[in-house]
Structures are given as structure tokens and as C-alpha cells.
Image: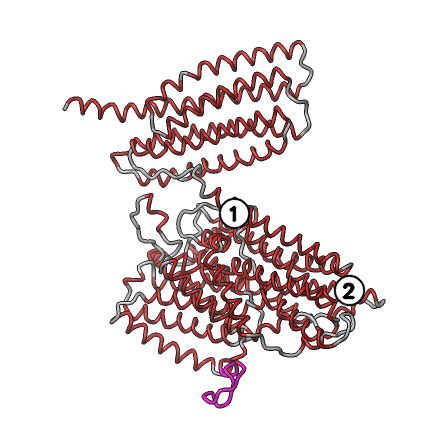
């Protein structure tokens, strides 16, 4: 039994590294969002600045490790054996919970998750102790730091509303003063804005990044024997005024003499500040519990008492954390920052929701998002009646975006938002977190940075009529996920604590193994999704502006649709003939993916037409027809896979031997047609299309014959209505699939002839 705790310490060390990886994947959005979204500096520079901030912040985080030891529960009320169960439950739960959110690309708060996991595990253990001693439920308050838990909940509610509101107001005022042509404003305007922004950010570095560290509590002669913490709290006004003047003057000098883009400087400093503060204050969320467990184990080993008799009063005292340990943790975080694809996924969610331009909407609108948008539109109409027309015109001019002429293939180079919004995001987040820290309010950096970004997006009119319901739905989903985090963390940690308490020697290895398996499985699934996103078979947007260019570029997409369509049709036949539900289920997912990709191409038609030259308008008609035929093909395949899956899933009668034989013949013919078409489009041998189209008549004859055979069987020996319905559905929908495919081929052949033959005639004339 004694060795079990040593094994738990080793396991906690492993879990600490895993938690660092999944933790930084989640929290990277806090300090990368503004810099990446604005594209103010290169991605490499952003990562270097953030890495330096994380590394320095990690070394300064020693003073924050107290939270895991005594911030949520009263350690003196628990014995060593009980504390180890609490800590193990917290770490297992934390890794799995954060990994789920990372895989979904949803930013959540590591602070809230660790706090509610500690709370849930401690409450569960307290209730077990109370029940064993025959106590009353009300005694649980003796074990838990209830005031801290109340502060956390209050902080969640407050940060969501305040961050969004303040971000929106500051961005609206900033845009009103600077407009989108901020680079053309007088130098003193940029210098003044920079002075305010850099003052907020640098004060934030000291208040949030350094105040919680052990260095902030040391006395310095230069401060009259006082501590840095006291100085920051007592001299706020003078620090802000002096900093504003100095930064404004320095900014003016840099703008005038060094020709520096001061907005880029704000973004660089702000990224560093948020990265430093994140590591300095949030590192406890990942390694605080393992460090506390190691301290407890060290004290218990030296005591000579049994694990169930050694009280944990020692955790209530201050124990400095080894700086080399903090440095090692910082290096793990930096490495994860560079290599984690899940970190990029979480950042993408925030950027998509705040994007100024066109982006693929990830969230579906719901009644709440539609209600909020209608309310906002109504409020806007009321405002238009109140403000004078001249004022409204002036405001509209300030919010008018400059026209940037970019060809379609350059769209990806546009930033999600401009430098002003990026600077406001960093400045407002810095100010709010600094104020909360000065009043000792527990505020999540994730909540603040995300909600500020959403508020500035709203004020900057990034949420227009085309995207508002989707963006609002996304924000509501993320916020709902935050509250779900608290509930899930509390419940899951409590459950794991209970299971460990039943028999720690049995449940510890089982739960640890389960956590490792789930983590590996999640990593494999994410890797597969990433590969699928980068697959050569994925459809790509057409970027050409001429008919000949569209013919050439669309060929790859058509080849991919035909190739994937052939596999889907064949898999449907296999699943039906073998009654294999798993094959049909996977097939159903494949056609959904293909349909979504075709729909995405159709959604891009507006931008495709906008990109065309006057001399190439004919390309739009051809491209629209091609996409229409592709959509018809995917709709037919969707119906075929859907009815087949439904038939087998409902355990209806298997198709008869003759029916399977007839479908097999059709499948072979369809496979041959699609295969030859794929080769023609891949090699761009469009002259072969004529011969391929001729196969349609042969397949149509087979379909007609099979329909007649099934009619005869139905009138004589067929006894299953479901079987008959399915078979006719397959034949008729295959006919529609064949018609859509041949129509596409004919359209391509006609367009190819008309674009190539004139050039040939001209050459012959020469």
C-alpha cells in the first residue's frame, strides 16, 4: 500500500507534462489571437515573442503555486491518503476535459477548470469523511474555502459581460477617432493612441505578470524599503500618468524620426505581455497540483506515520517551487506552442468569429442568436431616429472600409482585422485584467481576451447581415462551453475521487490507463482529421477568371468528386449486400463531407463572379452549371446512402440474390464510367469525354430492364414492401445520378470544344 503513493507521484509527473501540452493548446488563443489575426508581423516573429514571454513568465510563477495547495480547500482537514486521491482525480479530469475542448477547437478557461476540479474532488472527499463519521452535510463548509468559490463564480459572470461591453465601446470610439485610414492621421494622433495603449499594456505586465510572483513580495531600497506589490497598488495614478507621457513622447519620436509603424509595436509588446502573464499566473493550473502532491509526499515520507494518519497542515504553509522545475515547465509550453496543431485549431475559432471579411462559418444559427440580432437591428433603427442625419453620415464615413483590390487567389492574404482592432484587443484586455487583479478579483484571461475580441468585432461591424447570426451563435456556444466546463469539471472530479476512494490500489491504475487510452485515441482522431483536411482529394476553389482557366482548374475537382462518388456508390452496394451497418455508417459520413465541400464551392460563387474580368463573364455561366451538376450528383449519392443505411439499420429484409446480382451489374457499369471519366479529367484528355458519354445508353438500358424485372417480381413473388421500395429507390436515384453525371460531361465537352477549336482554326489559318 505504501508504494502506491510513489507510483501516484510518478503518474502525476507524467500527467503534469500532458496537462502542460493540452493546457497551452487551449490558452494559446489568449496571446496569439490579436497578432495572428492582424498579420502585423510574421508568424515566426509572433511565435518568438510569445515564446520569450511564456519562458520568462514561467520562471516568475512560483508565488502562484499556493492556489493548488490551499486556495480552494482547507488542507488541514484532510489526511495524506485523502489529499493524494483529490490531486489524482483533479489531474486525470483536467487533462481529459481540456483535450475534449481542444479537439472541438473551443477555447475554455484552465483557471475555472482547475478550480472546479479541486472543488469537486474536495467536496466529494469531504462528504465521504462526513458520512463515515456520521456527521451532518452542513459540515462540508469546514473543508471548503467557500468564499473563494463564490468569487470564482462571480468572476465568470462579471468578466463575460464587462469584457464584451468595454471592448465594444472602446473599439467604437477608437474607430470613430481613427477610422480605417488611421495611417493617414496626424503623427500626434498615433503617438497619443500608442501612449495610452502601451501604458495599459506595460502596467498590465507589472500588475498581472509580476505582482503574483515571489519577487513582488521582496523589499527594495529604491522603493523605500517597500515591496513591488505595495508600490503597484498605492501609486497607480502616478505610474499611469508618467508612463502615458513617456510612451507618447517615445512613440512620437519613433513615428517621426524612425518611421516606425507604432501599431505594430503595440501588438508586439501586447503579445509579449499577455504571454508573460499567462505563464506567470496560469502555470499553476497545469503543474500546481503535481507540485503540491510532491511536497505532501516528501513531508509524509519523513513523518513515519501512516498515510491515513498524517494530516496535511503542511500544505497551508508557504513552500517555494524549484526554479529549474518552473524553467522545464516553461520549455514544455514553448515546444507545444510551436508544434501543437490543436493550438492552431483553437486560435482559428476565435479568428473566424472576429473575421472582418468572408470566412467559412463554423456554427449554425439558433433562436437565441436570431433573437439577439433582431434586437440589435431594432436598437440600430431607434438610434437612427435619435441622432441627426449629419452625425450619422459622419459616423458612417469613419466606419467605411477602404476598397482593397485583390484577386481571388490573394484572399487568404487579407488579415482577419486591422492593426487598430488588434491594438484595442490587447489594450482593453490588459486594462481589465489589471483592474481585476488590483481588486483581487479572480478573472480568467481566456474569458477576458475572447470576449474583448468579440466585443470589438461587433463594434467594428465585422458581424454584418451576412454573418451576424452565425457569429453570435458561435459566441453563445463558446460561452455555454465555459459554464459547461465548470459543471463538468466539478462533477467528473467528484466522480473520479469517489471511484479512487473505493479501492485506490485497483482504481488508480484502471483510471490512469483509461485516461491515457482516451488521450491517445483523441490524438489519433485529431491526426486523421488533419490529414483529411490536407488530403489531395479535397475540393479547392477555382481562382481563374477565363473559361479556359476554369475548364482546366475545375477538372481536378470533378475528378475528385467522381473518384469519391465511385467509392461511395460501391461501398453502398457492399454494405447492402452484406448487411454491414458499419460500412454504411462510414459511407454516410463520407457523402456528408463531400456534399459540404460542394456546398462550400457554391457559397464562393459571389466572390468568383466578382473576380472575373469583363471579357471573361462567360466563365461564370459555365462554372455555375458545373457546380449545379456536382450538387445534383451529391444529392443523388446522399439519398442512395441514406435509404440504404436506414434499411439495414431498421433490420429490414435483406435484398434477394437476383436483386444483388442486378445491382452488382449496375455498380460495375457505373464504376467503369466513373473510372474512365476520372482518368480523362486527371490527364485533362477532354477529347475522350465523347466516348465515355456513349456508355450512358448502355447503363440506362440495364436500369430500365431491372425496373421491369422488379415490377414483375412485385406482382408475382415479392413479399416485402420495404424491400421493393428500397430497390426502386436505388434504381431511380442511380438513373438521376447517371443523368447528372452525363450532363456534366456533355457541358464540359461542349465548353472544351468551343474554347479549343477556334484556336485550332486560327492556327491552321496561319
Task: Please provide the residue range marked out in magenta.
Answer: 217-231
Instruction: Answer whether residue 70 is visible to the viewer in this image.
Output: no
Instruction: Answer whether residue 474 is visible to the viewer in this image.
Output: yes
Q: Dot 2: few (<14), some (14–19), or many (≥20) neighbours within 10 Å?
A: some
Q: Nearer the viewer, residue 714 or 586?
A: 586
Q: On the rendered structure, is 413 left or right of 162?
A: left
Q: Nearer the viewer, residue 143 or 318?
A: 318
Q: Are marks 2 and 1 in contact (CB under 8 Å)?
A: no
Q: Residue at x 43, y 55 (%)?
A: 385
Q: On the rendered structure, is 440 left or right of 509?
A: left
* Residue 93: % across, % down: 65, 58
Secondary structure beneath dot 1 equals helix
The verdict on residue 764 being magenta is no
* Residue 16: % across, % down: 59, 63
* Residue 576: % across, % down: 61, 25
| Mark in the foreground, 2 or 1 | 1
Secondary structure beneath dot 2 equals helix
Q: In this figure, which residue is indicated by the disc labeled 2?
A: 127
Q: Residue at x 60, y 12 (%)?
A: 711
Q: In this figure, which residue is indicated by the disc labeled 1?
A: 527
The verdict on residue 225 being magenta is yes
Q: On the rendered structure, is 188 left or right of 707?
A: left
Residue 203 in the image: above or below residue 592: below
Amino acid at each position: 500500500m505504501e508504494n502506491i503513493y510513489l507510483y501516484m507521484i510518478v503518474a502525476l509527473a507524467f500527467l503534469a507534462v500532458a496537462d502542460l501540452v493540452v493546457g497551452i493548446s487551449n490558452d494559446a488563443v489568449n496571446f496569439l489571437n490579436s497578432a495572428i489575426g492582424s498579420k502585423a508581423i510574421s508568424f515566426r516573429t509572433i511565435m518568438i515573442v510569445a515564446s520569450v514571454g511564456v519562458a520568462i513568465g514561467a520562471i516568475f510563477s512560483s508565488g502562484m503555486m499556493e492556489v493548488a495547495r490551499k486556495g480552494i480547500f482547507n488542507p488541514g482537514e484532510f489526511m495524506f491518503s485523502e489529499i493524494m486521491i483529490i490531486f489524482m482525480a483533479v489531474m486525470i479530469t483536467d487533462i481529459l476535459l481540456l483535450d475534449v475542448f481542444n479537439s472541438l477547437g473551443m477555447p475554455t478557461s484552465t483557471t475555472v477548470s482547475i478550480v472546479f476540479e479541486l472543488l469537486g474532488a474536495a467536496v466529494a472527499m469531504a462528504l465521504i469523511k462526513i458520512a463515515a463519521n456520521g456527521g451532518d452535510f452542513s459540515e462540508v463548509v469546514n473543508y471548503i474555502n467557500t468564499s473563494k468559490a463564490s468569487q470564482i463564480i462571480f468572476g465568470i459572470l462579471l468578466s463575460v459581460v464587462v469584457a464584451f461591453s468595454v471592448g465594444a465601446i472602446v473599439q467604437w470610439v477608437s474607430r470613430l477617432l481613427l477610422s480605417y485610414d488611421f495611417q493617414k492621421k496626424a503623427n500626434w494622433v498615433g503617438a497619443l493612441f500608442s501612449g495610452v495603449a502601451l501604458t495599459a499594456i506595460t502596467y498590465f505586465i507589472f500588475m498581472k505578470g509580476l505582482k503574483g510572483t515571489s519577487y513582488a513580495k521582496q523589499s527594495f531600497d529604491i522603493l523605500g524599503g517597500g515591496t513591488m506589490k505595495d508600490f503597484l497598488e498605492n501609486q497607480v495614478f502616478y505610474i499611469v500618468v508618467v508612463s502615458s507621457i513617456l510612451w507618447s513622447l517615445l512613440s512620437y519620436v519613433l513615428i517621426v524620426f524612425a518611421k516606425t509603424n507604432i501599431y505594430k509595436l503595440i501588438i508586439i509588446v501586447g503579445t509579449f505581455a499577455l504571454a508573460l502573464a499567462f505563464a506567470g499566473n496560469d502555470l499553476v493550473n497545469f503543474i500546481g497540483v503535481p507540485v503540491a502532491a510532491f511536497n505532501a509526499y516528501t513531508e509524509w515520507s519523513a513523518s513515519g506515520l501512516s498515510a491515513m494518519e498524517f494530516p496535511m497542515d503542511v500544505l497551508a504553509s508557504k513552500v517555494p517551487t524549484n526554479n529549474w522545475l518552473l524553467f522545464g515547465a516553461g520549455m514544455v509550453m514553448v515546444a507545444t506552442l510551436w508544434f501543437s496543431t490543436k493550438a492552431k485549431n483553437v486560435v482559428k475559432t476565435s479568428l473566424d468569429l472576429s473575421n472582418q471579411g468572408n470566412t467559412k462559418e463554423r456554427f449554425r444559427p439558433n433562436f437565441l442568436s436570431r433573437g439577439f440580432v433582431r434586437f440589435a437591428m431594432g436598437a440600430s433603427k431607434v438610434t437612427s431616429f435619435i441622432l441627426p442625419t449629419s452625425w450619422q453620415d459622419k459616423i458612417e464615413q469613419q466606419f467605411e472600409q477602404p476598397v482593397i483590390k485583390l484577386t481571388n487567389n490573394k484572399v487568404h492574404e487579407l488579415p482577419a482585422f486591422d492593426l487598430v482592432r488588434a491594438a484595442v484587443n490587447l489594450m482593453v484586455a490588459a486594462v481589465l485584467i489589471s483592474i481585476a487583479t488590483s481588486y483581487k478579483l479572480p478573472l480568467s484571461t481566456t474569458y477576458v481576451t475572447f470576449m474583448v475580441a468579440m466585443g470589438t468585432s461587433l463594434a467594428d461591424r465585422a458581424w454584418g447581415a451576412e454573418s451576424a447570426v452565425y457569429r453570435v451563435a458561435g459566441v453563445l456556444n463558446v460561452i455555454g462551453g465555459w459554464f459547461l466546463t465548470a459543471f463538468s469539471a466539478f462533477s467528473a472530479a467528484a466522480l473520479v475521487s469517489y471511484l479512487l476512494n473505493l479501492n485506490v490500489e485497483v482504481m488508480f491504475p484502471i483510471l490512469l490507463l483509461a485516461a491515457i487510452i482516451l488521450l491517445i485515441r483523441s490524438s489519433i482522431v485529431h491526426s486523421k482529421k488533419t490529414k483529411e483536411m490536407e488530403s489531395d482529394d479535397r475540393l479547392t476553389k477555382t481562382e481563374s477568371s477565363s473559361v479556359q482557366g476554369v475548364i482546366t482548374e475545375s477538372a481536378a475537382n470533378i475528378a475528385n468528386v467522381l473518384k469519391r462518388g465511385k467509392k461511395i456508390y460501391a461501398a453502398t452496394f457492399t454494405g447492402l449486400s452484406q448487411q454491414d451497418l458499419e460500412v454504411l455508417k462510414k459511407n454516410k459520413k463520407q457523402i456528408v463531407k463531400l456534399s459540404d465541400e460542394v456546398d462550400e464551392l457554391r457559397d464562393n460563387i459571389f466572390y468568383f463572379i466578382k473576380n472575373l474580368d469583363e471579357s471573361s463573364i462567360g466563365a461564370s455561366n459555365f462554372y455555375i452549371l458545373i457546380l449545379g451538376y456536382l450538387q445534383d450528383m451529391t444529392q443523388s449519392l446522399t439519398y442512395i446512402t441514406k435509404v440504404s443505411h436506414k434499411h439495414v439499420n431498421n433490420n429490414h429484409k435483406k435484398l434477394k440474390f437476383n436483386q444483388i446480382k442486378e445491382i452488382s451489374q449496375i455498380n460495375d457499369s457505373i464504376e467503369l464510367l466513373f473510372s474512365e471519366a476520372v482518368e480523362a479529367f486527371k490527364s485533362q484528355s477532354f477529347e475522350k469525354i465523347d466516348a465515355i458519354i456513349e456508355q450512358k445508353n448502355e447503363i440506362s438500358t440495364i436500369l430500365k430492364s431491372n425496373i421491369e424485372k422488379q415490377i414483375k417480381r412485385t406482382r408475382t413473388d415479392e413479399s416485402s414492401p420495404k424491400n421493393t421500395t428500397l430497390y426502386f429507390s436505388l434504381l431511380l436515384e442511380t438513373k438521376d445520378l447517371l443523368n447528372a453525371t452525363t450532363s456534366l460531361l456533355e457541358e464540359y465537352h461542349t465548353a472544351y470544344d468551343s474554347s479549343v477549336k477556334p484556336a485550332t482554326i486560327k492556327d491552321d489559318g496561319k
